[in-house]
Image (cartoon, helix red, strand yellow):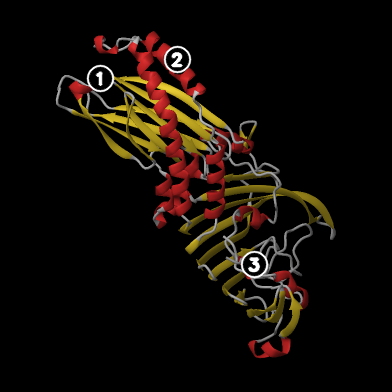
Amino acid sequence: MANQIGETRVHTYEVGAAAARKITARVTIGEGQRGGWAAFLDDRLLEKGSAPRVLGLGEAAALRGRQLLINSVVIDVRPETNRLSVTTQVKGGRKELLARHKNVGGDGATANYVTVVIFI
Amino acid sequence: MRTRTLLVGAVAGWVGSVGVAHAGDPPAGDPPASDSLPGESADEISDLDKLRAPDSPAFLLLGVSPVEIQRPTTPKELSVALGSFVSSGSLVVPDSLSVEIAPYWLFWHPALTGDDMATSSPGEAAVRNFTVSLGTTTRSLGQPDGMGGTIDASVTDLALGLRTRWLDGRRRAACWADVDQAAQAIAARQGREMAARMVEITASYHLESRPDGLPEAERKRLQAELEQVRKQKAPALVELEEVAARCVEASAARRGLVGDVAVAGSLRFPGGQLDDGDWLAAGGWITLSAQGESHNLIALARALADNASGEASLVADLGLRYVLVHGRYALSTEGIYRRLGADVDDQDLFRVDVAVDMRLYGTVWFTATFARDFAAADAGEVFALANVKWGFGGPTVQLPGE
């Protein structure tokens, strides 16, 4: 069995004062690797996928106090590198958030990354 | 799909050895020179596969096959690998070094997706596949002692090679979708349980009444609690690993156009100091192949300038091979034109071979081979020096793999 990596990161995100601003998130599995992600707003599945996709989370006022959870599973399929990374970009609020998991595994390693964003 | 390999050895056994005039005998201990590239011994038949752009051109030029090659994956590892060039504050040539560097992969690429890799443009492929090979080797050579004799002296050769694949062919992409979907299903299943627990846990943090967010200590506590949940819910990934391993294997076979280019140069340092080198050899290779389900066409060009003997010589090759495997028939034909430097009698040489297989029944094949080697003095002697052989047994032709 190949090496398995896992980690959870919690971030807070200020949605800002403009109540009607649209907040979005984008998930990218990097390093040329394969895998999949699933995005949940609180406990509701928003979307799942593998390619980077912009997810509309809703208006700023409606998001305050809620949580976004991105669960991703990545596998090393590249002979050129053993690096594994997943980046979650949240935009539309007071500042941009770039939440990144990155690790180096062995050949064929897998990673289970959980990113939680709490909107304030 | 049936895959078989051209059994060059079977042809080589009866075609005979290559005999091409050399510019001069190389000093004892030197790698083979003249018409052969390093790594290709003089009595070994030269076939088209050996003329292809090498994976590590520096090592080929040095005529070495390192058992252990350092492949740094970070800039820090690279600086450690190259540290042997510095000794006591001065630049030196290490006695024995084998390093292969893929500059693009020394750094993180968080925005590079798996689909990006599958749809690289020639420019992107050239950057991502670019490698640098750097090698040194120390050998003992007989040198004039000034009194009419020779004395063994140690010299260190250094070679630098550059290589890239600018056309990467097409990989089988369908299985990647299987890998992605398997990963998505796992992520969704585990994520659903994680999200439900997250809502329960964060309820106790009263996030709705904290306009300034969580203090750092509480954020870390929440992170630790959720990490515990992740560990408890960690999915079994064995099935995903198996699907991915199968896809990695299947996608190794390319279809379409594959283009490689490599160059290398080497220097000799009698004193082991970097400021005291003589040029030894230089080579260039370019290979272009079209790979289909049942056929493969490859064209190549290479050149080697060699100064090992002290007198510069040049060898240039152009080659073409076509392999067709269809049902019970298979055909392989290749030709190599070789141009030697100006200081030999016969500058133009060529080599041709054709192999045909036909399956008679079961595993019994009729095979026939025709070959004409470089040894012929001129093009008109092709039939006089050609060999034709036939027999029964296993097939001799197969599609080359990538």
Relative to B251, is A54 above or below?
A: above
Chain letter of the residue carrying label 2: B
Number of numbered discs present?
3
Query: Which residue in the protein does label 3 denote?
Result: B4
Contact flag, marks 3 and 1 (Cβ < 8 Å): no
Q: Look at 45% across and 15% down and name the residue there.
A: B224
Residue B212 visible? The answer is yes
Q: Look at 48% across and 56% down and name the residue there.
A: B172
Chain letter of the residue carrying label 3: B
Whole-percent x, y for residue B269 in the image: 67, 49
Query: Which residue in the protein does label 1 denote?
Result: A14
Q: Split into 4 quadrants, where in the image is the N terminus of chain B?
A: bottom right
Q: Which numbered disc, 3 or 2, marks the residue that appears first in the sequence?
A: 3
* Amino acid type, label 1: Glu
Whole-percent x, y for residue A50 in the image: 39, 41
Query: Which residue in the protein does label 2 denote?
Result: B225
- Point out the frontmost of discs 3 and 2: 2
* Amino acid type, label 3: Arg
| Of residues B79 and A30, the one drawn nearer to the viewer in this rendering | A30
